[in-house]
Image (cartoon, rainbow, N blue to C red):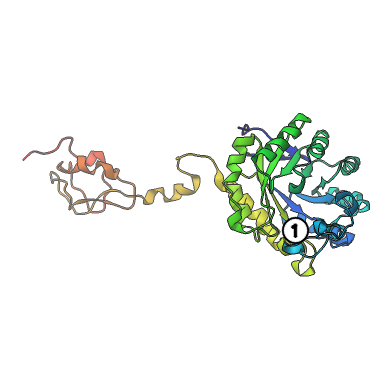
Amino acid sequence: MIKNNHTIFIDGRPIGDEHPPYVIAEMSGNHNGDINRALALIVAAKKSGADAIKLQTYTADTITINHDSNDFMIHEGAWNGRTLYELYEEAHTPWEWHEELFAKGKEIGITIFSSPFDTISVDFLETLGAPAYKIASFEIVDLPLIKKTASMGKPLIISTGMADEKEIEAAVFAAKEAGCKDLILLHCISGYPSPCEDSNLRTIPDMRSRFETHVGLSDHTLGTAVSVAAVALGACVIEKHFTLSRADGGPDAAFSLEQDELTTLTQDCLKSWKALGVAGYHRKPSEQVNAPFRRSLYVVEDMCEGDLFNNTNVKSIRPGYGLAPKLLPEVLGRRATKPINRGTRLSFDLISPSVCEE
């Protein structure tokens, strides 16, 4: 198992069990080909409380080829009927934008990093001082790319959508073999969108144990509920696609959060993490004010000195200033040591030391 005190730092922000979940707003193609929109997305993500904006660094020509045969057609889902080349030509973030986007993030105080899709992309991102890297789910089988990226010595996040246990194991081994010391796996379902019932969030603690890494969630479900639930199961990173407005369209708009939803996500993930607390049975500070309203033993009828305590004149009632209710069997049958008014909390000085035998 990973050690609970193992902390990963991305751009100075600590990530791990002892720190709030790290929320990544995935820009992907939601800039819709407009750098001003890309810049606005960065500002909006910062205002929403996200820790980072993630880009994708590729071109249509580096990720596929321009071909319209059946192999290169998309036949289902959100991009049905398009070629891979058409999709990636629309969705890619132009390389000439990167420097300005990184600078904008630095200016306003939000981390920018990216998913490289080839070794040239890694070299390019290094020139921009990328503080971390992300391997996309579809690239988890590209072990040379993982090794190249891991060799940069930066924190590495790997999404695991569609990958089986052996493929994840191979990716983890490749990353560590190449020198990666700060690795985070993201549980991921690569459906766009993916139904909640496919999420299988119990995989998160299993992955932590099985692969001895920190684990987060790359979430493609609609809304924020699944992400918040993932934090409760130990996810230290949450990644969600983000857009200014779904109505504006774009390749990922249909399953992306808008700004108010991203704000809700960041706030509720933090609440979920805070709610985890620690295992324990001590009385919590917020409970102290209500402790007096627990039950205790009170005299409920006027009594004279020498009267016997019985089930009629002593009761377990609220509030909790008297003797504990568990002592009632020891009280019954003993005598009052002095007159007692109705409504008096029962205490040992009011009770004779032994049960009266008649």
Residue 351, position as x, y percentages in the image: 20, 40
Is 186 in front, or is 59?
Answer: 59
Q: Is residue 151 above or below residue 334?
A: above
The residue depicted at 58 percent of the width and 41 percent of the height is 205
| Outermost residue to the bottom | 247
Is 218 in front, or is 78?
Answer: 78
The residue depicted at 63 percent of the width and 51 percent of the height is 269
The residue depicted at 18 percent of the width and 52 percent of the height is 313
Q: Secondary structure at mark 1?
A: loop
Residue 338, quarter of the rendered image: top left
Residue 119, position as x, y percentages in the image: 87, 40
Count of numbered marks: 1
Q: For this view, does 172 lie left or right of residue 199?
A: right
Residue 235, position as x, y percentages in the image: 63, 45
Residue type marked 1: Phe
| Outermost residue to the left | 358
Q: Image quadrant for the C terminus?
A: top left
Residue 38, position as x, y percentages in the image: 85, 58
The residue depicted at 25 percent of the width and 41 percent of the height is 327
Residue 258, quarter of the rendered image: bottom right
Q: Is residue 251 above or below residue 16?
A: below
Residue matched to label 1? 242
Q: Image quadrant for the N terminus?
A: top right
Is 224 in front, or is 1?
Answer: 1
Residue 130 seen anywhere in this rendered image of the structure: yes
Q: Residues within 10 Å of mark 1 (few under 14, many from 20)?
A: many
Q: Is residue 176 above or below residue 327?
A: above
Is 83 in front, or is 2?
Answer: 83
| Outermost residue to the front | 70
